Image (cartoon, rainbow, N blue to C red):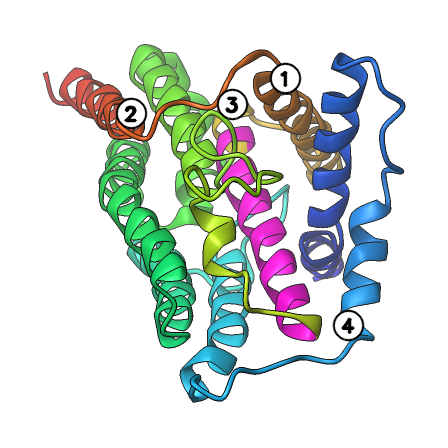
């Protein structure tokens, strides 16, 4: 019980630090000092103490978007095990709910953007859902591969002790799945090469354009929800990579935290050495991730 509580506390507190590590890596590669590692926490604190401005053309949907999005991603985190302890919520088939909760968060974010009546934000929402229609099948196929390889239908079991034996018997399939999950993680979190989270160029913005009218606490909820989502996808990749069994649950938790640090460094490095893809190339990359997961499934079913 204590380990589960610590696991939940880490899930709620560490995601902004993950963004700080990514920003610091990008700054170091570019030869800059970079912002403090805790800068994302300072930004959230500052936004929470500001007031929110609402357009007269918006309805309750605009205000509900950030809240529902954050609540959906946070609930999805309860279904995932991060270390030696099981997930807070676990049942057979919960990986389907996990994918649907992430889809619910995206749906309300896009709906809030459309509620503003802005053609610019509508363009961003259209791009977001178009790319999501290609990223979600890849994610679901990856989860199906994990379910097939481990013989389990719960995320806690799929990413638990049974994953070690699955690596010994289905290593190539799981390796393809890990690569596909990493690509999906970059796409779902609007990272380079799919989108630049720091850009403000009108013709290239995807996720950022949807949240331009949000301010104050609402914008803080959006930023925090995005950090939680990045942490969740990083947790999927790290738990898949660390499939071997640990004798101590505390050792498993420490290995997970080290893996998350490596994940942040890898994401920062990828964003430093790659340019943003043209919008026409993004669907090709996401289809490639789906193809990798299909190949993985074929290797398991042969």
Q: Is residue 10 visible?
A: yes
Disc 1 and disc 4: Cα gap in Å?
30 Å
Q: Is residue 8 left or right of residue 208?
A: right
Q: Report which residue position mark 1 lands on.
A: 272
Q: Main secondary structure of the magenta part?
A: helix
Disc on res. 241: 3
Q: Circle 4: is it few (<14), some (14-19), or many (20+) Cα within 10 Å? A: some
Of residues 21 and 271, which is closer to you in this image? Answer: 271
Decide: marks 2, 1 in contact (CB < 8 A)?
A: no
State which tag comes first along the sequence, 2 or 1.
1
* Residue pictured at 74% horizontal, 32% vertical: 23
Question: Residue 101, percent across and down?
Answer: 38, 62
Disc 2 and disc 3: Cα gap in Å?
17 Å
State which tag comes first along the sequence, 1 or 4.
4
Which type of secondary structure does the marked residue at label 3 adopt?
Answer: helix
Does the magenta portion include 251? no
Disc 4 and disc 2: Cα gap in Å?
37 Å
Of residues 154 and 222, which is closer to you in this image? Answer: 222
Q: Circle 3: is it few (<14), some (14-19), or many (20+) Cα within 10 Å? A: some
* Residue pictured at 70% horizontal, 62% vertical: 1
Disc 3 and disc 4: Cα gap in Å?
36 Å
- The magenta-colored residue range is 217-238
Q: Examine the rendered structure and indicate whether residue 213 appears above or below residue 191.
A: below
Of residues 46 and 4, which is closer to you in this image? Answer: 46
Question: Residue 74, percent across and down?
Answer: 55, 63
Decide: marks 1, 4 in contact (CB < 8 A)?
A: no
Q: Is residue 91 visible?
A: no
Disc 3 and disc 1: Cα gap in Å?
23 Å
Disc on res. 120: none
Q: Report which residue position mark 2 lands on.
A: 289
Does the magenta portion include 220? yes
């Amino acid at each position: 019980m204590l380990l589960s509580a610590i696991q939940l506390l880490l899930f709620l507190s560490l995601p902004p630090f993950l963004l700080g590590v990514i920003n610091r890596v990008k700054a170091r590669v570019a030869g800059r000092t970079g912002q403090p590692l805790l800068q994302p926490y300072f930004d959230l604190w500052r936004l929470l103490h500001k007031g929110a401005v609402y357009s007269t053309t918006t309805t309750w949907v605009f205000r509900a978007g950030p809240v529902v999005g954050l609540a959906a991603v946070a609930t999805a985190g309860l279904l995932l095990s991060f270390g030696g302890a099981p997930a807070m919520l676990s049942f057979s088939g919960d990986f389907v709910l996990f994918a649907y909760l992430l889809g619910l968060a995206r749906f309300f974010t896009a709906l809030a953007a459309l509620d503003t009546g802005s053609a610019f934000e509508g363009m961003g929402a259209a791009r977001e859902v178009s790319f999501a229609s290609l990223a979600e099948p890849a994610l679901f196929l990856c989860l199906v591969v994990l379910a097939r390889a481990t013989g389990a239908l719960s995320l806690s079991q799929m990413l638990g002790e049974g994953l070690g034996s699955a690596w010994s018997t289905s290593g190539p399939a799981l390796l393809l799945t890990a690569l596909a999950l990493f690509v999906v993680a970059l796409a779902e979190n609007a990272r380079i090469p799919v989108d630049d989270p720091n850009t403000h160029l009108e013709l290239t913005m995807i996720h950022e354009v949807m949240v331009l009218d949000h301010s104050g606490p609402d914008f803080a909820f959006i930023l925090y929800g995005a950090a939680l989502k990045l942490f969740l996808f990083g947790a999927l990749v790290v738990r898949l990579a660390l499939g071997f069994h640990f004798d101590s649950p505390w050792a498993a938790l420490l290995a997970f935290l080290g893996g998350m640090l490596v994940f942040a460094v890898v994401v920062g490095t990828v964003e430093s050495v790659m340019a943003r893809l043209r919008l026409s190339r993004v669907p090709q990359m996401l289809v490639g991730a789906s193809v990798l997961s299909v190949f993985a499934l074929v290797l398991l079913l042969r």
